[in-house]
C-alpha cells in the first residue's frame, strides 16, 4: 500500500518536473535565488563552502581497499608502494544502485571532495566506489596501461578496466540494481569518456552520469592553470618565500582568533588576510603545479622516457630525488604535453599531428555522442576559472536542458554547498533531471 | 607475546638499516644520456633549494620511514581497525579525551616553562574542568565551553629558548621529527609517566600503555606513501619542519 502511494507521489512529482522543465524557455537550466555566499571565483575555488552553508552529511563506513590491476607488472622500486591500486567503498546491505566516483586532477580516492560525495550518495542509498584520478601517482603506477596518462580515450579505458576489476571483487558481496558514474573537474571529463566507452563495452550500461565542473579542452584548461603560477612575484624560484609568508600570515590570524583550526579556517583566514585574486591564483597555480610535477616524474620513471630522469638510470626507494623534484616543479603541464606525451604516443601513431593530438583531448571530440545521449547531465559554474572565455557556452549548446549552470562557485568551490549536494543526488534519483 | 612481536620488528628494523648494500651501486647520473629537461639547464645558477631541510641522516631516515610503513601496514593499522570495530564510537571518544587530558597537563607544564601566562592558564583551566566535571577527562567539557587548547611540548619549549631544530629525524614507530623534538619527547614522556603513576591505579596504567599508542594512531590520519606525491619524503620533511617552526613562533 505504502509503496503504491510512493509510486503515485513519484508520478505526480515527475509530471510536475516535466511541466516545469518544458515551461523553461531557455535551452539551459539557469539557477535563480542561488545563495552560495562567495561571489569571487578565485575565493570560491580556494575556500570552498563555509560550514554553515554546507549540506549536513552523516559519517559513513568509508573503507579503503586495494586491488592488483596488472598482477604481472613489476613496479619500479622507487614507487614500490604503488603496486596495488588503492580505492575506497561504502556499501549498503540491501540491493541498491551503485555509483562510481572519479576524483579530479592529482586527487585521491579519499580526498575531501570524493569523501563528501560518498557521504551524500551513501545517505541517499547508493553503494559507493571511489577511485583516484588517473593523474594520481598511485593510479599511474598501478592502473595506467601505458604509464603515460592524459589521453582522453586511453584514460577512459584504464578507468573502465579498474571499474571492471573492482566490480568482479564486489559482485559476490553486494546486490546492485543499476550502475552510475560521476566525477568532478578532470574526473567529470573522464566520466564522459567512460560513459561513451560503456556504450560499446556494455558491461555496466550506466543509468545516469553526472559531470561536475569538467573542462572542455584539457589543453586549454592546463594552459590557464600553468599560467597562474606566474602570479608569484619572481615565479617558482620564490615559491618557498611566498608559501612561508602565507603560512605565517595564516598563523597570525589563527593566533588572534584563538580558535582551533576547523573547516572554516581557510574562510576566516581569507577574510582576515584580505587576499588578492593574484595571490589566490598563485595558490591555485602552486597546488596544480605540485600535482603535475608528481605526475610527470612518476610517468618518466615508469616508462623510463628520459624526461627529467636520465634514461636508463634506476632509482630505488632510498634514492635522493631532490634534483628531480626541483626540476619538475619548474616544468609546466603544457611542456609535458609537447615534449613527453606527444612524442611518446607519436611512436605508435605517427600520422597524427601535434595539433590533432591536442585537440582530440576535448569533449568536442565526442560532441555528437554527448548531444544524443540523455543519460548524461552537467553541473557547472558560469565563473569557473579553468574555462577559457566562452567555453561555458559549450555546455548550454550541447547538453541543453541537461546542463545546469550556477552563477557562482568558481572551480568546484560550491560542491559541498547544500543546494549543489541536493542537485548531485537528484541527478541520479529523479530520472537524471534534478 | 607483545615483546616477541616487538623484538621481531626491531630485528627487522636493524636488518632494513643494514640492507643498503642490497642495491647494486649506480653509475653517477652524469654517465647517462642527458634527459630532455636536465637540472643544469632548468635550475637557475646559484638557486636555493626551495624546500631544503637540514637532513644529514637522510639514508637512515628513509630506511626508518620505510620500516614505519611496513610496521603500520602489518601491525599498527590492523590493530587500529580492530579497535575501531570492537570499541564503539562514544567509548573511543571518551578514551581519546582521557589521553588528551594528559596532553593538556603537559601543555600546562611546558607553557609555564615557556613563561607563557595565557597558555598556562588555558591549559590548566582545561585540566581542572575536564578532570572534575569531565569525569577524569572522559568528557571534553572545556572544549564545549570554548576554552582554547594550546598544544605545547618540550620540543617547543626548547625552541622558545633558542634551541634550533637540528637535523631532521624520522623516529621508529613515531614518524617525522627532528633532533630537538625527538630529545624533547623524553622529558615529556617522563613527566607524563610521573603524573600517571600518581593519579592512576596499576590496572588502568597498564591498560594505558597499550591503549595510548592505539588511540594516537587512530586519531592520526597520516599514512606513509599515501599523499600521492612522488616526492613524498621531501614534502613531508618540509611540511613538518615548517609547521614546527610556526608552532614555536606563535
Image: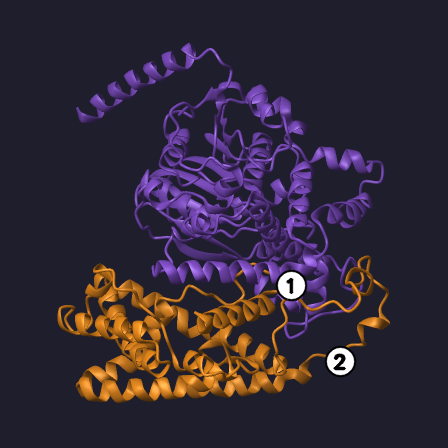
Chain colours: A purple, B orange
Q: Residue at position x 74%, y 79% from top?
A: B24
User: Residue A4: which quarter of the image?
Assistant: top left
Query: What is the x, y in percent for residue A250?
Result: 47, 58
**Chain for numbered disc 2:** B
Tell me the residue that label 2 is attached to: B25
For residue A307, above or below residue A375: below
Do labels 2 and 1 touch, CB within 8 Å? no
Position of A408 compared to B216: left or right? right
**Chain for numbered disc 1:** A
Q: Residues within 10 Å of mark 1 (few under 14, many from 20)?
A: some
* Figure label count: 2
User: Residue A18: which quarter of the image?
Assistant: top left
Q: Quadrant of the N terminus of chain A?
A: top left
Q: Secondary structure at mark 2?
A: loop
For residue A201, above or below residue B75: above
Mark number, residue A189: none
Q: Quadrant of the C terminus of chain A?
A: top left
Q: Residue at position x 64%, y 45% from top?
A: A228
Tell me the residue that label 1 is attached to: A75
Q: Residue at position x 42%, y 11% from top?
A: A22
Task: Please tell me whether mark 2 or mark 1 is closer to you in this view.
Answer: 2
Nearer-the-camera pick, B16 or A230:
A230
Distance between the alpha carbons at the discs numbered 2 and 1: 20 Å
Nearer-the-camera pick, A367 or B38:
B38
Position of A266 compared to B210: left or right? right
Q: Residues within 10 Å of mark 2 (few under 14, many from 20)?
A: few
Amino acid at each position: 500500500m505504502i509503496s503504491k502511494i510512493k509510486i503515485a507521489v513519484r508520478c505526480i512529482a515527475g509530471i510536475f518536473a516535466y511541466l516545469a522543465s518544458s515551461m523553461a524557455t531557455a535551452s539551459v537550466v539557469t539557477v535563480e535565488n542561488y545563495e552560495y555566499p562567495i561571489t569571487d571565483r578565485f575565493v570560491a575555488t580556494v575556500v570552498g563552502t563555509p560550514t554553515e552553508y554546507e549540506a549536513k552529511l552523516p559519517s559513513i563506513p568509508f573503507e579503503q581497499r586495494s586491488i592488483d590491476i596488472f598482477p604481472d607488472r613489476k613496479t619500479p622500486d622507487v614507487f614500490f608502494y604503488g603496486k596495488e591500486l588503492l580505492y575506497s567503498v561504502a556499501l549498503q546491505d540491501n540491493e541498491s544502485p551503485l555509483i562510481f566516483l572519479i576524483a579530479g586532477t592529482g586527487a585521491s580516492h579519499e580526498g575531501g571532495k570524493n569523501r563528501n560525495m560518498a557521504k551524500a550518495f551513501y545517505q541517499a542509498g547508493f553503494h559507493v566506489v571511489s577511485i583516484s584520478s588517473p593523474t594520481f601517482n598511485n593510479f599511474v603506477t598501478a592502473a595506467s596501461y601505458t604509464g603515460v596518462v592524459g589521453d582522453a580515450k586511453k584514460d577512459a579505458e584504464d578507468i573502465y578496466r579498474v571499474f571492471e576489476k573492482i566490480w568482479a571483487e564486489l559482485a559476490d558481496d553486494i546486490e546492485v540494481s543499476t550502475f552510475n558514474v560521476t566525477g568532478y573537474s578532470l574526473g567529470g571529463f573522464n566520466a564522459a569518456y567512460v560513459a561513451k566507452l560503456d556504450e560499446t563495452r556494455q558491461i555496466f550500461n550506466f543509468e545516469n552520469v553526472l559531470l561536475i565542473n569538467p573542462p572542455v579542452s584539457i589543453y586549454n584548461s592546463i594552459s590557464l592553470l600553468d599560467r597562474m603560477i606566474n602570479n608569484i612575484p619572481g615565479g617558482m624560484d620564490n615559491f618557498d618565500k611566498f608559501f612561508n609568508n602565507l603560512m605565517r600570515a595564516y598563523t597570525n590570524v589563527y593566533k588572534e582568533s584563538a580558535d582551533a583550526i576547523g573547516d572554516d579556517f581557510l574562510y576566516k583566514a581569507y577574510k582576515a588576510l584580505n587576499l588578492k585574486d593574484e595571490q589566490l591564483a598563485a595558490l591555485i597555480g602552486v597546488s596544480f603545479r605540485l600535482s603535475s610535477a608528481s605526475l610527470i616524474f612518476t610517468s618518466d620513471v615508469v616508462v623510463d622516457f628520459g624526461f627529467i630522469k636520465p634514461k636508463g638510470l634506476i632509482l630505488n626507494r632510498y634514492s635522493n630525488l631532490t634534483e628531480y623534484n626541483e626540476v619538475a616543479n619548474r616544468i609546466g603541464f603544457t611542456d609535458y604535453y609537447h615534449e613527453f606525451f606527444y612524442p611518446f604516443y607519436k611512436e605508435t601513431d605517427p600520422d597524427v599531428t601535434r595539433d590533432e593530438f591536442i585537440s582530440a583531448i576535448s569533449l568536442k571530440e565526442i560532441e555528437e555522442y554527448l548531444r544524443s545521449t540523455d543519460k548524461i547531465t552537467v553541473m557547472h559554474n558560469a565563473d569557473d576559472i579553468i574555462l577559457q572565455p566562452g567555453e561555458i557556452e559549450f555546455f548550454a549548446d550541447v547538453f541543453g536542458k541537461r546542463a545546469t549552470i550556477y552563477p557562482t562557485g568558481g572551480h568546484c568551490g560550491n560542491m559541498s554547498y547544500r543546494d549543489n549536494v541536493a542537485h548531485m543526488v537528484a541527478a541520479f534519483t529523479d530520472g537524471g533531471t534534478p | 607475546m607483545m615483546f616477541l612481536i616487538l623484538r621481531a620488528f626491531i630485528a627487522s628494523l636493524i636488518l632494513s638499516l643494514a640492507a643498503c648494500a642490497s642495491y647494486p651501486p649506480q653509475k653517477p647520473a652524469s654517465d647517462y644520456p642527458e634527459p630532455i629537461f636536465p637540472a643544469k639547464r632548468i635550475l637557475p645558477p646559484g638557486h636555493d633549494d626551495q624546500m631544503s631541510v637540514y637532513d644529514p641522516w637522510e639514508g637512515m631516515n628513509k630506511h626508518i620511514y620505510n620500516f614505519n610503513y611496513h610496521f603500520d601496514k602489518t601491525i599498527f593499522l590492523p590493530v587500529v581497525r580492530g579497535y575501531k570495530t570492537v570499541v564503539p564510537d562514544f567509548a573511543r571518544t571518551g578514551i581519546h579525551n582521557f589521553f588528551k587530558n594528559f596532553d593538556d597537563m603537559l601543555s600546562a607544564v611546558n607553557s609555564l616553562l615557556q613563561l607563557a601566562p595565557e597558555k598556562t592558564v588555558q591549559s590548566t583551566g582545561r585540566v581542572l574542568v575536564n578532570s572534575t566535571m569531565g569525569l577524569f577527562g572522559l568528557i571534553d567539557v572545556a572544549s564545549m565551553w570554548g576554552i582554547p587548547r594550546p598544544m605545547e611540548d618540550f620540543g617547543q619549549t626548547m625552541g622558545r629558548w633558542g634551541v634550533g631544530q637540528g637535523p631532521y629525524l624520522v623516529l621508529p614507530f613515531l614518524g617525522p621529527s627532528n633532533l630537538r623534538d625527538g630529545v624533547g619527547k623524553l622529558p615529556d614522556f617522563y613527566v607524563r609517566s610521573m603524573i600517571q603513576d600518581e593519579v592512576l591505579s596499576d590496572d588502568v596504567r597498564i591498560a594505558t600503555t597499550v591503549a595510548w599508542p592505539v588511540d594516537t594512531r587512530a586519531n592520526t590520519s597520516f599514512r606513509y606513501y599515501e599523499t600521492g606525491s612522488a616526492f613524498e619524503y621531501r614534502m613531508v620533511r618540509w611540511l613538518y619542519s615548517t609547521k614546527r617552526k610556526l608552532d614555536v613562533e606563535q
